Each structure stands twice: as C-alpha cells, then as structure tokens.
Image (cartoon, rainbow, N blue to C red):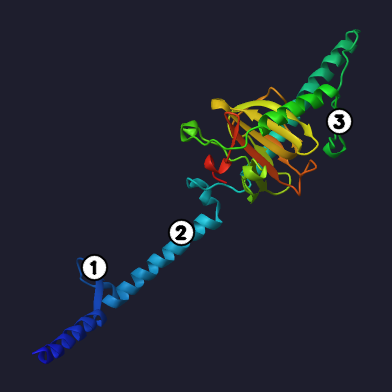
Amino acid sequence: MSKELQPAEKIRKKRWFRRLRNKYRLIISDDESLEPKFTIRLSRMNVFVITASSAVLLIILTTYLIAFTPLREYIPGYTDMNLSKNLYDMYLRADSLERLLVANEHFITNLKLIISDESPLELNVRPSDTVIRRYDQITLTRSKEDSVLRKEFENQYRSGIFPIIQSSAREGINFFTPLKGIITNEYDPSQGHFGIDLVAPENEAVKATLDGVVIFASWTIETGYVIALQHQRNFISIYKHNAVLLKKIGAFVRAGDPIAIVGESGRLTTGPHLHFELWYNGNAVNPRDYMAF
C-alpha cells in the first residue's frame, strides 16, 4: 500500500512545483473601454524572488544610511565620534573669548580715564598681547608645607588595601566614564594597583565621573599632575599622570566636565595614559563595578 502512495505523493509535489512556475497575467485596463493599459506576466516564484530581493535591498540600504551617513546622529544611542573633541574646543574658545572680553573692558576703561586726564588702572593683560602658554616649560616651586600636604593626602588614600563594594552605594548614581580608551592595566590591590590604566589618543580630555568638588590638584613626583574630586555618598575619584590640569582646588564640576588632559607626567608612567581610581568610604573599589569602559 505504501508503494501505491508514493506515486501519488510525487504527483502532488510536481503539481505544487508546477503551480509555483505557472504564469499569471496582471492586466490594468480602462474602466469604460476595457482597453488594456498595462500588462505584466508573473509566476508565484517570481513574486517570491522579487519580494525577498526587495527586502534584502531595503535592509542593506538602511544599514548603509545608519552606518555611513549623518542620519545615525538622530538615532538614540549613536553619536558623533568627534563630539567630545568639538565640545572641548568650544570650551577653550569660550574661555579665550571671556578673557579677551575682560581685557578689552579694562583697556577701554583705561582709555576713558586717560581722556579724562585721570590715572589709568594697572593692567595685567592688553588686547594686543598674544598669550602663548607652554605647559611643558612651567617651572614649579614647592614649599615645605606643600610637600607635607601632598604626602599626607597620598598616605590617606593609599591606606586602604582591601576593596569594599556595596551595591547600595551606587543606587541612584549614574557614573560618567572619565575617558574612552583601552584598558591596559586592571584593578589589582594585591599588587598595589588601586585603579585602572586607560590609554587614549593624545590631547584627549579627561572628564569628571560625577558632580563634585576638587579637593586636590597639584603635581607629585611619582604620579605627575594629579586631580582628585570629592563626590556625594563618600566617593572620591582620582585622575593621575595628566599633562595639564584644567581645574583648581575648590572648583565645583559637573559630571562630564573636562578637568584635565591625558598625559604621561610623573616618574611611574610608561606612556600617555590615565590612571583612574575610585574610592568609597576610604577604601579602593574597582571602577569596572560602577561604570562601563
């Protein structure tokens, strides 16, 4: 009986395949005269192939528009790769314009005083001056009190060895990644490494991970230019080996504000990078547990 069914099944399969290849005519004609205006012959196989090809083409076109055109900036989660650099350049230009505006106001005030036959005010900056800041030629004079203060601060945040990680400590807090780069050295308190090392392009801006106040901004022999911020809930973030510090002690910063420039200052550096540490209640914690790099 099974042998009798096999030919029937083959016949049904042939009929089904033949139906896929059967041609159908689509005619669009005039409603009144019934004169054909447009005619096309298609099979079910043709319709399937055209539909699949159109879907694939649409997916490829959409992917290209998202990946290689400015349209991706309007999609949540995508951003311009040069956005951070442009924001930092705008910040520097705004700061320069503010300095120039103050200098022009002082200069105009002195002109008015001279015209009025009065003694001009002492000016430290004139609009015609061209100020060129060479950070690599800065000479620092350290007093005995400054050295003692730096030593006390370093001893304070190096005293904790074992990390204390509490999930409740970071609830409700959104940490901002200080620098987008490659991690070359992980957090390892057993080896005396209480943070992570991030390698990034030269002149990249280092940003504050949370809102906070600058409690330390100076130079040390081993770690170069260092800046530390005090945050809410007893968090402290420390940024080492910077080339330039953009904030001073006592300044209030917002999360994401530029606070330094990546560098390789200090005796312990092996190249341009950022050594970033995060401390909670006086103990070092792994920054990877609080933010994504």
Please, what secondary structure does the residue beneath circle 1 have? loop
Query: Which amino acid type is marked by label 3?
Result: Leu
Residue 198 lies, with reference to residue 257, above or below; the image says below
Place of residue 69 in the rendered image (x, y in percent of width and height, measured from the top left) = 55, 55
Place of residue 281 in the rendered image (x, y in percent of width and height, measured from the top left) = 57, 28
Gap between marks 3 and 1 measured at Cα: 92 Å
Query: Which amino acid type is marked by label 1?
Result: Asp
- Mark 3 vs mark 2: in front: 3
Q: Residues within 10 Å of mark 2 (few under 14, many from 20)?
A: few
Residue at image location 75% in from the left, 43% down from the top: 263
Residue 193 lies, with reference to residue 22, above or below; the image says above
Please, what secondary structure does the residue beneath circle 3 have? loop
Residue 74 lies, with reference to residue 59, above or below; the image says above
**Residue, disc 1:** 30
Q: Is residue 11 left or right of residue 75?
A: left
Please, what secondary structure does the residue beneath circle 2 have? helix
- Mark 3 vs mark 1: in front: 3
Gap between marks 1 and 2 measured at Cα: 38 Å
**Residue, disc 2:** 62
Q: Residues within 10 Å of mark 3 (few under 14, many from 20)?
A: few
Gap between marks 3 and 2 measured at Cα: 56 Å
Place of residue 47 in the rendered image (x, y in percent of width and height, measured from the top left) = 30, 73
Place of residue 18 in the rendered image (x, y in percent of width and height, measured from the top left) = 22, 84
Residue at image location 83% in from the left, 37% down from the top: 135
Q: Is residue 176 visible?
A: yes
Q: Is residue 112 left or right of residue 159?
A: right
Nearer to me, 247 or 17: 247
**Residue, disc 3:** 140
Q: Earlier in the sequence, mark 1 or mark 2?
A: 1
